[in-house]
Amino acid sequence: MTVSVTAWVLLAAQLTNQADRRLEVYSRVPLLQCGVASLPQHDHPARIRSDQAPLVQVVAANGTVTTPRGNATAPPVSVTDLRVASGEIPAARYTVTDGERYRVLVYRNRCGETVRLVADMSNRADLLGDFGFVLLVIDAVAVALAAWLSSVVIGAGFRPLDRIVSAVEYVESTRDLDAAVPHDPGDPDETARIAHSVNSMLAALARAKLAQHQLVEDASHELGTPLTSLRTNVALLLRSELNAERKLSMRERRQLLVESDAQLKELSALLAEVVDLARDPRSAEDFDLLNLADVVHSAAARARSRNPKVGFDLSTRSAMIEGQPLMLERAVLNLLDNAAKWTRADQRVTVRIGVGDGHVSVCVADRGPGVPATDIDRVFQRFYRTVEARALPGSGLGLAIVRQTAEAHGGCAWLSRREGGGTEAWLRLPRPR
């Protein structure tokens, strides 16, 4: 549209310039340089036509106009004409509209006469009107074509996004996290990346949902054992109180209460570990710059109070990391408790901190029977317990919490067989950059 307006304005200016040049050339005709009023008179048409020479008039200072014989239609004398006739200005050009459009050149010739040349510009108006109409049609076609092309291009560009939106809406309505967002090899790179990101997110959500489902199932199974035992003991005590014929002795009641107390403690510990395992480690607490040695000493103090018959030998050094102090302390405490279960009174658990290239590590070593090679990786699974461990207290969640904490900190955890017998449990964490 701007181009069309500019073209129209330029054409109008060009036509005006052409008319001015034509009048200028005509004003140099020798006959018009002196004695114009005394020229032989000749007839003029009633209207000035654009294909004719301009109308010649002589304007007196009092405004009287002399035109060679004839009564051709011309615009009336203007103030500009009178200014030239009075000698105020030497010449002037102007455009006037008086029913028709005229271009006027008024000047004083060598003899002091004020000559007025009037050219018809009606053809200019017609040409500009036709040209403007053509430009308007071109602009309308261009706008329509641009709109059509835009709709085609935008439609083609948004078609892959429409597929992604439809797939996401399907997942939202069906809760089917296994549904994948389709994308064609010919899709733009940006669309392909969006589809890949959405698919990765859906896969992560599916894994989280599966892990949550497995945790609920495993927890239900593990919680069932202490709950069943506790329910049985409570039922026996209640029956003893309600049925005098089946009354339990004081020793039997005391034994049931002791067992119930132990089962409640086991149940409380199991629930606490399930909650820790189910909690999102990234949102549990903030990451702080801390010394791993402080975490190990704090965990060791708690382990000594929980395992008074077991000795712990610490070999620590300063090792700065970025982590969640409470979660890390819980993970180290789980390693210490796990080692204490397999340590006799005449043995000791050793703990050492190592600093490597870009990482720090905690190693907790015991002199127990060791973990069978077939179970050395499986012990980090939730609720998994080796055959030997089933005779000892524990839920099978301690090492799972250790691995989850390690991975939440960008590290890893593993077990290895200790030279000379026993097990080494490792927790490796990255150093701050």
Image (cartoon, rainbow, N blue to C red):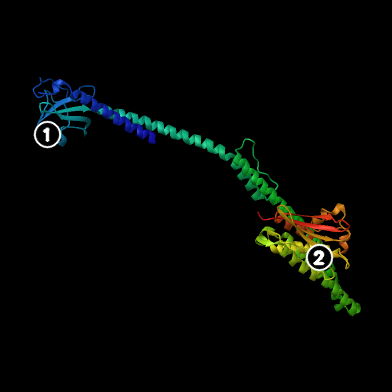
Label 2 with label 1: CB-CB less than 8 Å: no
In this rendering, the answer to whether 240 lies above or below 138 is below
Q: Quadrant of the N terminus?
A: top left
The disc at residue 212 is: none
Determine whether the residue tagged by mark 1 lies in a helix, strand or loop. Answer: loop
Query: Which residue appears at 17% of the width and 30% of the height?
Result: 106
Q: Quarter of the image holding residue 122? A: top left
Q: Depth check: give the residue in front, 189 or 307.
A: 307
* Relative side of 413 to 79, left or right: right
Q: Position of residue 34 (x, y in %)?
A: 11, 23
Q: To which residue does mark 2 refer?
A: 313
Query: Which residue appears at 64% of the width and 39% of the height?
Result: 183
Mark 2 / mark 1, whichever is N-terminal: 1
Disc 2 crowd, CA 10 A, few/some/many (<14, 14-19, 20+) = few
Tag nearer the camera, 2 or 1: 2
Q: Position of residue 202 (x, y in %)?
A: 67, 48
Q: Depth check: give the residue in front, 233 or 265.
A: 265
Question: Residue 247, can we see it?
Answer: no
Q: How many marks?
A: 2
Query: Which residue appears at 74% of the width and 60% of the height?
Result: 277
* Relative side of 27 to 282, left or right: left
Question: Residue 258, can we see it?
Answer: yes
* Relative side of 321 to 377, left or right: left
Determine whether the residue tagged by mark 2 lies in a helix, strand or loop. Answer: strand
Amino acid type, residue under disc 1 in the picture: Gly
Q: To which residue does mark 1 refer?
A: 87
Q: Position of residue 263 (x, y in %)?
A: 82, 69
Disc 1 crowd, CA 10 A, few/some/many (<14, 14-19, 20+) = some
Q: Position of residue 117 (x, y in %)?
A: 17, 27
Amino acid type, residue under disc 2 in the picture: Asp
